[in-house]
Amino acid sequence: MRTSPNRLIATIFGAVYLLVGVVGFFVTSGIGFFATEGANLIIFAVNPLHNIIHLAIGAALLYAGMNSTVLSKTINTTVGAVYLLVGILGLFLVGSPLNIIALNGADNVLHLASAVVLLGIGLSQDKVPATTARAHV
C-alpha cells in the first residue's frame, strides 16, 4: 500500500466515508429514510439513506484499498465518476422533491471534491506498462 497512491487514497477515503456513515446515524434519529431535508452533520445534510450510501461507498473503497492496486484503481475511478455525477445532479436537486438523499450545497462541494481526487488518482496513478498489459490479454 505504501507504493500505491490508489490503495492509499482508497483506504483513507474508505475509512472516512465509513466513519461519516456511522456517525450520521447519531444525528438522523427521527428523520425520514427518504427525507429531502436532512439533519446536519457538521455542515452536511444527511438522512438514513444518505448514511447507508456512505457506508456502502466507504466499505467498497476500504475493501479495495486493503486488497490490490488494480481493484483500488478501478473502485477509485468508479466512485469518482459516480460522485462527479452526483455532484452535478445535486446542483439541480437541492430544494427539489427528488432530493431523496437530502443533499445540500456543502454536500455538492464535497462530492465534487471527492470526484476530483478519486478520478485524478484513479486515472493518473499506478499505470500498468503496455508490455505487461498485453501479456495478460
Image (spheres, rainbow, N blue to C red):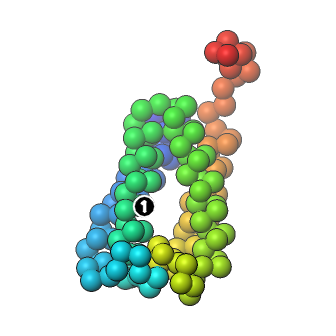
The answer to whether 103 is drawn above or below residue 71 in the figure is below
The answer to whether 74 is drawn above or below residue 79 in the figure is above
Q: Nearer the viewer, residue 84 or 116?
A: 84
How crowded is the residue under tag 1: few (<14 C-alpha within 10 Å), some, or many (20+)? Answer: some
Can residue 45 be seen in the rendering of this structure?
Answer: no
Residue sitting at 65 percent across and 79 percent down? 92
Left/right of residue 74 with respect to residue 22 in the rendered view: right
Can residue 71 be seen in the rendering of this structure?
Answer: yes
Residue sitting at 66 percent across and 26 percent down? 128
Residue furthest right as drawn: 130
Residue sitting at 46 percent across and 82 percent down? 36
Identify the image quadrant of the N terminus.
Answer: top left
The residue type indicated by label 1 comes to: Ile
Give the number of callouts.
1
Give percent across and percent down for residue 69: 52, 32
Instruction: Label 1: state its secondary structure.
Output: helix
Q: Quadrant of residue 41?
A: bottom left
Left/right of residue 20 with respect to residue 109 in the rendered view: left
Q: Nearer the viewer, residue 101 or 17?
A: 101
Give percent across and percent down for residue 78: 59, 47
Q: Nearer the viewer, residue 128 or 82?
A: 82
Q: Nearer the viewer, residue 99 or 18?
A: 99
Q: Quadrant of residue 35?
A: bottom left
Give percent across and percent down for residue 119: 64, 50
Give the residue number, with chain letter if any, for mark 1.
53
Residue sitting at 44 percent across and 54 percent down? 57
The answer to whether 129 is drawn above or below residue 105 in the figure is above
Left/right of residue 49 with respect to residue 104 in the rendered view: left
Identify the image quadrant of the C terminus.
Answer: top right
